[in-house]
Amino acid sequence: MILDEEIDIDATTEDLKLFADFMQQIVRFDRFVKPYNLEINLEEAAVLLALTDKHDCGETRLAIRKRLVHLAKAEPWEVLYIACDWDDLWVGRRAIAQLSNRLIHTVPPQTSDANIWLRLGPLSHAWQVAFLRLYMPTTWQGLNPQSNIPTPTIGELNSSFTTWANNFDPKKI
């Protein structure tokens, strides 16, 4: 490489500094620093995921994913959104396992309605359908007498998040 040659890196200086600092923690201090103790927030995790994906840093990516799983204990919806953006089923399932009926029905920031549809809005269509399919199981009541077509009836909401998070798979849709 010639010294006058440009290196095309599509990232801000702050993001590159964050990436370099994070890489140093992971590589240099890996015996002392566990991923769940890393001092990164959700926004930084999203930036780092983009950079690790672009520059093929598998070990660093795994550390970020483990940190996200730890952050899901406090902010499962936000971690679920990041998992959806990166199509990371492993992180998504762990975020879903941290949900509760209270978190399903709490009001998202900057809204006035407590509505699950607002919570699901940032997810891709495949993730929304997979989520709802497990959250609202249907039971078949038999054939509609006029059309002779099976008629589904929505049964009880399934609030066993830990149990059905394992079955969450948007790729099966």
Image (cartoon, rainbow, N blue to C red):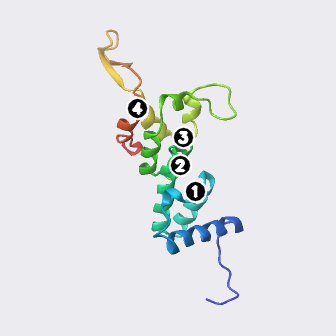
At 57% from the left and 44% from the top, the residue drawn is: 78
Left or right, 66 with reference to 111? left
Residue placed furthest toward the top: 145
Mark 2–mark 4 Cα distance, whole angstroms, equals 25 Å
The residue tagged 2 is 71
Of the two numbered discs 3 and 4 in the rendering, the one whose residue sits closer to the viewer: 3
Mark 3–mark 1 Cα distance, whole angstroms, equals 15 Å
The residue tagged 1 is 45
At 47% from the left and 43% from the top, the residue drawn is: 95
Instruction: Say which amino acid is labelled 4.
Output: Arg
Q: Position of residue 103 (x, y in %)?
A: 53, 32
Instruction: Say which amino acid is labelled 2.
Output: Leu
Of the two numbered discs 2 and 1 in the rendering, the one whose residue sits closer to the viewer: 2
The residue tagged 3 is 77
Closer to the N terminus: mark 3 or mark 1? 1
Residue placed furthest toward the left: 142
Left or right, 162 with reference to 41? left
Q: Looking at the image, is 97 positioned above or below residue 4?
A: above
Instruction: Tell me whether the residue at label 2 lies in contact with that at label 4, contact meaning CB atoms closer than 8 angstroms.
Output: no
Query: Please, what secondary structure does the residue beneath circle 3 have?
Result: helix
Instruction: Say which amino acid is labelled 1.
Output: Ala
Closer to the N terminus: mark 1 or mark 4? 1
At 51% from the left and 55% from the top, the residue drawn is: 67
Instruction: Tell me whether the residue at label 3 lies in contact with that at label 4, contact meaning CB atoms closer than 8 angstroms.
Output: no
Marking on residue 133: 4
Mark 2–mark 1 Cα distance, whole angstroms, equals 10 Å
